[in-house]
Amino acid sequence: MTINTNTLVSITEANQNFSRVARLVDENGAAVILKNNVPRYLIVEFGQAESEKLAVDEDVMAISKRLIEKNRQAYEVLAK
């Protein structure tokens, strides 16, 4: 993941000025909150988080379909 250095915010600053963090997310799509100078939290718009979840669910479905096709005979025996 590429991090825009303009979206880095210390946890202290985020705590004291969350509206600035929200503006960063609105303008850049994400903000990274640092704790002890290490990226710790990623703030994204809710809609983006939902689309990420859907992508993961799609990956799981694709893997499941592949495994079912690969092991179809075993599943049919177990279903009896």
Image: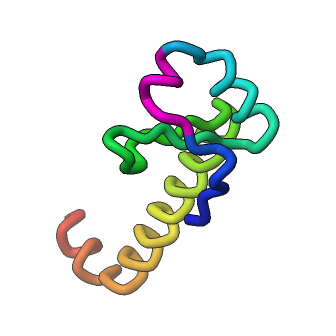
Observer-nearest residue: 52 or 16? Answer: 16
Left or right: residue 78 versus residue 65 is: left
Observer-nearest residue: 17 or 30? Answer: 17
Q: Is residue 14 magenta?
A: yes
Observer-nearest residue: 9 or 64? Answer: 9
Is residue 76 placed above or below 25 in the rendered structure? below
Identify the residue at horizontal 76%, vertical 44% (top origin). Answer: 28
Is residue 5 placed above or below 76 in the rendered structure? above
Percent across and percent down for residue 57 are 51, 53
Is residue 58 placed above or below 62 in the rendered structure? above
Segment tinted magenta in the rendering: 9-15
Identify the residue at horizontal 48%, vertical 38% (top origin). Answer: 33
Percent across and percent down for residue 19 are 67, 16
Identify the residue at horizontal 51%, vertical 65% (top origin). Answer: 59
Q: In which quadrant will I find the C terminus?
A: bottom left
Task: Return the residue found at the far right.
Answer: 27
Report which quarter residue 36 is drawn in.
top left
What secondary structure do most residues of the magenta stretch adopt?
helix
Is residue 54 placed above or below 9 in the rendered structure? below
Identify the residue at horizontal 20%, vertical 75% (top origin). Answer: 77
Report which quarter residue 73 is drawn in.
bottom left
Report which quarter residue 75 is drawn in.
bottom left
**Number of numbered discs present?**
0
Percent across and percent down for residue 24 are 72, 34
Percent across and percent down for residue 50 are 61, 39
Q: In which quadrant will I find the N terminus?
A: bottom right
Visual colour scheme: rainbow
Q: Is residue 27 magenta?
A: no
